[in-house]
Image: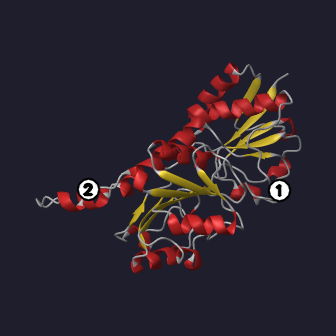
Amino acid sequence: MKINVLYAGTEKSWPDYEQYLKLAFHQRRLNVSLKCNFTDLGEVDYIIYAPNGPFNDFSIFPNVKAILSLWAGVENTVSNKTLSQPLCRMVDEGLTEGMVEYIVTHSLRYHINLDKQISKQDGVWRHDTMVPNLARDRTIGLLGLGALGSACALKLRELNFNVQGWSRTEKKIPNIECLSGDKGFDKVLKTSDILILLLPLTDKTKYILNSKTLAKVKKGIFIINAGRGSLIDDEALISFIDKGTVAAATLDVFSKEPLPSSHIFWEHAKVTVTPHIAAETRPQTSSKSIAENIFRSENGLGLLNLVDRVEGY
């Protein structure tokens, strides 16, 4: 029996996704009709969805078994009042690898003080003042220990950093100090040399770094946000950077994207802006994840990465 799958991502991405999805379906031995539109919407079994795609009304699809998001972040989709179908967020090896590489790159950049080393190419030999610490002497804290946070934590531990992580619910990850609750949150803030944000955006995590919580951080801390833009209060962050409490910040996500050209982040000497590139969904790898989820659903195995509507992720 043919499975009808609607691709509802961007038109620009369709050629690549068409190619890799068809290959993934074939490899999983799924008999799929993949289209960008169906005349009879009641025929659609699954929707491959991106919030920047062609629609946001799910009520017109009466028989859809699951919405398979192309994005790791699902806060905009969860809040859609027309959504009644099961929703799965994107977790795939390419997205995870990209996030790990981004986090490791900027963690090492701050760890060895690379910005300072390369900013003064003026002929002065500063060996005595630029010898970096070893990773074993540096503590990295992660807010968020989901699929992406856990992968980053483990890779940083492999590099010999002291790694601690905080999550709203208790987690157990080998060789990682896993914390939760208010006391655990405060410990991560107070003892981390580098703080990485990889939390989902929910009512409970919005502006989790604000003037009150930033007042608790270790002086000279570096902050990397590759989770969601609204995890940080922009004005509070700039204030604590200007006070010298926060040494510098690298931000890949923002409350408003694209980041307005007039925003202070662009010109601030201690803020690095990257254009939401840390964890891009890649057709080659995400297509395999989508095919696997459809295979599982069709064979009664249960959907992977199913979103909890109450928690919001």
User: Which is more toward the observer, 258 or 244?
Assistant: 244
Question: Mark 2 against mark 1, which lies toward the viewer?
Answer: 2
214 in relation to 95, above or below: below
Q: Secondary structure at mark 2?
A: loop
Q: Residues within 10 Å of mark 1 (few under 14, many from 20)?
A: few
In the rendered structure, which amino acid carries the disc numbered 2? Val
Q: Earlier in the sequence, mark 2 or mark 1?
A: 1
Q: Is residue 70 above or below residue 124?
A: above
Q: Is residue 251 above or below residue 62?
A: below
Q: Quadrant of residue 79?
A: bottom right
- Is residue 57 or residue 217 the one in the foreground? 217
Crowd band around label 2 with a 10 angstrom C-alpha radius: few (<14), some (14–19), many (20+): few
Expressed as whole percent of the image width and height from the top left, the position of residue 166 reads: 62, 58
Residue at point 54%, 64% (across, down): 254
**Residue 134: percent from left, percent from top:** 36, 51
69 to the left or right of 160: right
Using the image as rendered, state which of residue 47 and residue 253 is in the foreground.
253
Residue 132 percent across, percent down from the top left: 30, 55
Q: Which mark is residue 82?
A: 1
- x 13%, y 61%: residue: 122
Which label was assigned to residue 131?
Answer: 2
* Local SS, label 1: loop
